[in-house]
Amino acid sequence: MNNEELEEELDDEWLDKLKSIESDYNDFYKKNTENIELYFFYLNTNNEVETINKIQYILDNNSKISKNNIVKIIKENQNKNNKKYYLKYLVKYNITIDPEEIQHLLNVDNYEGKNYMSQETYNRDIYFSDSISILQDLNALYLIFSEINKKTSIHTRKINIKRPQKDKSKITNNRLDKTRRKRV
């Protein structure tokens, strides 16, 4: 048998049908997280939300934000409306649900969403796990800034500690008590 006869004998129509059916479900397979939303919340001194900003951030090939980029983002966004803010919380939302669990998630209360949220720190890299394609828009990093209260801001003060003065007569007596060796 040559190749032409083999191709005629193999009917690959069923494979094409399977691929077309499967293409409908491509959105439900997990894939690498490529980009996320960064949300910036600015709280005033009364812990009330003043401003909310959102930007899209493209992750690197390992689905991570390096600590250097996190620090850069914080520094670029800590001033808003002529006010200075400090980072109060850094929260990651990474939905890592498996395709088989989607139906279950739709049938239960919304409390299971908190399982995908974690508090992060800016002094280490932040990694995002693979997510279902259709739910990747939900992956986000929330940066919550609080206004610096100028009245209660912490300043370093110099404190002078007064030590009790030693009796000078004791010092001289101590020196006299010590003997020296004679050099030969």
Image (cartoon, rainbow, N blue to C red):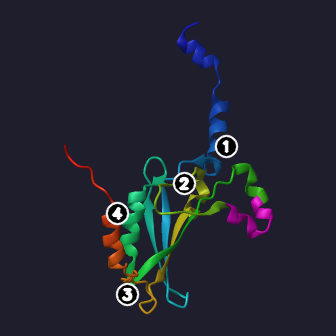
Asked if marks 4 and 3 touch (Cβ < 8 Å), the reply is no
Q: CA distance from mark 1 to mark 2?
A: 30 Å
Q: CA distance from mark 4 to mark 3?
A: 71 Å
Look at label 3 and name its amino acid: Asn
Asked if marks 4 and 1 touch (Cβ < 8 Å), the reply is no
**Label at residue 72:** none
Question: Taking 129 as reference, is 99 left or right?
Answer: right
Number of other residues with Cα within 10 Å of mark 1, as a class: few under 14, some 14 to 19, many 20 or more: few
Q: CA distance from mark 2 to mark 4?
A: 72 Å
Q: Earlier in the sequence, mark 3 or mark 2?
A: 3
Residue 52 in the image: state x and y as whole percent.
Answer: 49, 80
Query: For residue 167, what is the image quadrant?
Result: bottom left
Residue 65 in the image: state x and y as whole percent.
Answer: 45, 56
| Residue hosting label 1 | 21
Q: Which one is in front in this view, the residue at disc 2 or the one at disc 4?
A: 4
Magenta stretch: dominant secondary structure:
helix
Residue at the (74%, 64%) spot, across then down: 112
Q: Earlier in the sequence, mark 1 or mark 2?
A: 1
Q: Which residues are magenta?
A: 105-115
Number of other residues with Cα within 10 Å of mark 2, as a class: few under 14, some 14 to 19, many 20 or more: many
| Residue hosting label 2 | 128
